[in-house]
Image (cartoon, helix red, strand yellow):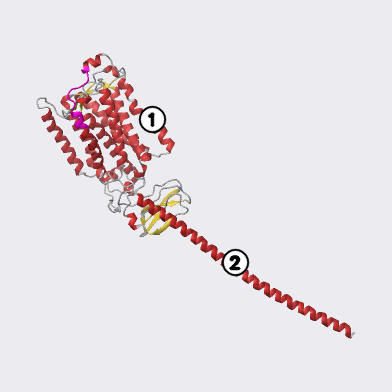
Amino acid sequence: MKSAVDNANANLATAGQQIIDIQHKITNVNSDIGKYQAVNKHIAQLQKGLNDLHNDVIDLRNKKLIVQSLEALPSPGGAMLSLNPPGCSTAKASGYPISLCAEGSPLMFDFITSGGSRHCCREFLMKPIVFPSDLLEESAMHVRNPRQPSASGFWIVLAMLAMISVPAAFTLHTVKASAFQPLNRVVAGNPTPFGYSVSLLIFVVPVLAIAFWFFPQEHIHISQRAFWWTVGILFPFGAGLDFFFAQFFFRFPDPDATLRILAPALGHPVPVEEYLFYLTGFLAVLSIYVWLDGYWLHAFAVPEDDARRTDFDRLLGLHANSFFLAVLLIGGAIVTRRIAQPDSPGFPGYLTFLVLTALVPSTALYREVRRVINWRALSLTLFMILLISLLWEATLAIPYGWWSYQPAAMVGLYIRAWDNLPIEAVFVWIAVTYGTVLVYETIRCWHASGRPLGDALFRRNAARVRRPASP
């Protein structure tokens, strides 16, 4: 009996020792678990540090790209604005637009002062970034906003015309004798049957190509209301020129160059091609400008929702320079007529009509609308139309008698090298291009503002928040 009790006690002692050993092992395991948890915590901290370092590297990369891009831009002044590419949406902060760009979106960067920060997006950013406004202060002073129209755009376009036309005028003035045959001898042989009618394709083909190929292919959205309003306003001026004044300004020596379909006009009828000429001409000028503004030179366009287009005071306002320029041109034409044609009675009515149709709207509209005109698109449109018109008139219409001009209504200055083409024939398409763009941009501003027409034209915008003057 005693032996059995001793064995039991021994077994209990052994079991107790085993329990103690197990407890020690459990303690050791808990200690190891604590160590593993501490290691995991350190690993998590290291991972967070690596992520922060990665984000810092991305920010530095983006900022370096932006600084390099800013330093590469040539012109001073202004601040970059968003180009609103695919993948980005537009929001407003403190009244200024900013870009909200999806990760990896291909776009051109912008930065706009808003609440003390500059919001930037650059090509193929890994993420949008925001940084203090003083980071790029020095570089920003050397950047020019490509969307900001130049305040001197009108005079730059005139200077571009002058630098080409002045030396050309001196060169053409060296021609002392015309190389062309007398017109009555040329017309007698019917040299260009239906030539005037077919030549309208010079305007029609670009209009169709732009409308049904270029616009759809590039998914360019245009303001169709503004487009057709412009055509509807301006075409009556072209038609009115023929209807009221063709009997004083024009002649049509070769009827075989037309379809011989006559359209009504005061004094005597005119070829129906005359009305089609002005209709297709306005369509061509406007289509080319809209195409250049919406695609080829879109970086310099003012967006439809830009404050410069929507937040104007009133559209009508006196622009004194346009008025004085009109007076100067008409007065100069009258004086030139008396000097160039002292023995020939007459009045420069054609140039007077062109000046009034171009500069009267400019006198009333230019002050507000100049901020939104794409002057680069306007200048390229002007040179394209001038090239077309000179090709048309100097090589075809005048030498072959499709139309001609009545000397009594001209200034009296002729280009002998181009079969005595009057200078008004050059000026007409300058006036048409400028007037078309001016009216079109005015109507776009009115539509973009959402204000009634009478209110937009005449009533001052009392709620207007005036922006800082553009450079």
Q: Is residue 128 above or below residue 366?
A: below
Q: Is residue 1 magenta?
A: no
- Front residue of 236/218: it is 218
Tag 2 or tag 1, which sits nearer the N-term? 2
Residue at the farthest right position? 1
**Residue count near mark 2 (Cα–Cα under 10 Å), binned few <14, some 14–19, many ≥20:** few
Provide the secondary structure element on which disc 1 rests: helix
Residue at the farthest top position? 189
Image location of residue 22, percent across then percent down: 73, 75
Tag count in the figure? 2
**Residue count near mark 1 (Cα–Cα under 10 Å), binned few <14, some 14–19, many ≥20:** some
Image location of residue 301, percent across then percent down: 34, 43
Residue at the image position 12 percent from the left and 33 percent from the top: 335
Mark 1 sits on what residue?
208
Query: Could you tell me which quadrant the N terminus lies in?
Result: bottom right
Image location of residue 405, percent across then percent down: 20, 24
Mark 2 sits on what residue?
40
Q: Is residue 172 magenta?
A: yes
Hey, what amino acid is under mark 1?
Leu
- Is residue 218 among the parts visible in the rendering? yes
- Front residue of 121/76: it is 76
Image location of residue 226, percent across then percent down: 34, 38
> Which is more foreground, mark 1 or mark 2?
2
Segment tinted magenta in the rendering = 168-183
- Front residue of 269/250: it is 250
Hey, what amino acid is under mark 2?
Asn
Residue at the image position 23 percent from the left and 45 percent from the top: 317
Q: CA distance from mark 1 to mark 2?
A: 70 Å
- Left/right placement of residue 134 relative to residue 167 reads right
Provide the secondary structure element on which disc 2 rests: helix
- Left/right placement of residue 308 relative to residue 212 reads left
- Front residue of 310/97: it is 97
